Amino acid sequence: MIRVLVVDDEPLIAQAHRAYTERVPGFEVAGVAHTAQEAMGVLRTAEVDLILLDLNLPDRHGLDLARALRAAGNGADVLAVTSSRDLAVVRQAVALGVTHYLLKPFTFAAFRDRLERYARYRAQVREATEVAAQHEIDRVFATLRGGSPDSLPKGLDPATFDRIRAALRAADGLSAAEVAARTGTSRVTARRYLEHLAETGRAVRSPRYGGPGRPEVEYRPA
């Protein structure tokens, strides 16, 4: 279970966030606090993985609390839950490593989406101590922040992408011309998709020697 501390100065809102949290499978509420001081007290006595942090607290700004936690070596993640639309505050939140910034008011669906993304992120980073390639890092960030590492740039077709990726996986190194021949696309089109695979860490480029002139570029699945 992911242990959550709810911090909000308004008791009714704090209880609503507690109820929302308890509706999401895999999460449990470790405590509720209405001030920064109360939050620090809970954190000294309970294990907390995620803090749902209102930024406008009566005794201390929420980001000051987050900064103090980092300085004290507390590794709990922070999801800012606030009505503040100040971009300077948003930038500070990003700099402090706040995982999400959720604007009030919000729906339960939006709240659940943030928690479920956070749960998937935790599962990914718990499974291994290091990553082997850039695309694995991209996947972790995409899980947490939103979007998909497999989303295609404008102009690339998903069906063509799948054909080209399948052809590459079925062979031990292919040039753009060879991929084009196997998939019924032009060489230029095949190269565009292969370059996208290489740029996203799902293919590896290498020179192929043996013929006259410049070496041909060969692509292998990563």
Image (tube, rainbow, N blue to C red):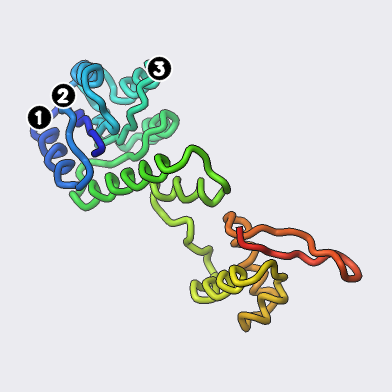
Label 3 CA crowd tier, 10 Å (few <14, some 14–19, many 20+): few
Amino acid type of disc 3? Ala
Q: Is residue 39 left or right of residue 75?
A: left
Q: Quadrant of the N terminus?
A: top left
Residue on which the image places disc 2: 34
Q: Is residue 86 above or below residue 218?
A: above
Q: Where residue 183 sits: x, y (%)? A: 61, 80
- Name the amino acid type tagged 1: Pro
Q: Earlier in the sequence, mark 1 or mark 3?
A: 1
Where residue 161 sits in the image (x, y, percent)? 54, 71
- The residue labelled by disc 1 is 11
- Position of the C terminus, as image quadrant, is bottom right
Q: CA distance from mark 3 to mark 2?
A: 22 Å
Q: Earlier in the sequence, mark 1 or mark 2?
A: 1
- Extreme-right residue of the structure: 212
Identify the residue under disc 3: 71
Q: Quadrant of residue 163?
A: bottom right
> Mark 2 and mark 1 in contact (Cβ < 8 Å)?
yes
The mark lying in front, picked from 3 and 2, is: 3
Residue 46: percent from the left, percent from the top?
A: 22, 23
Q: How many marks?
A: 3
Q: Is residue 148 above or below residue 162?
A: above
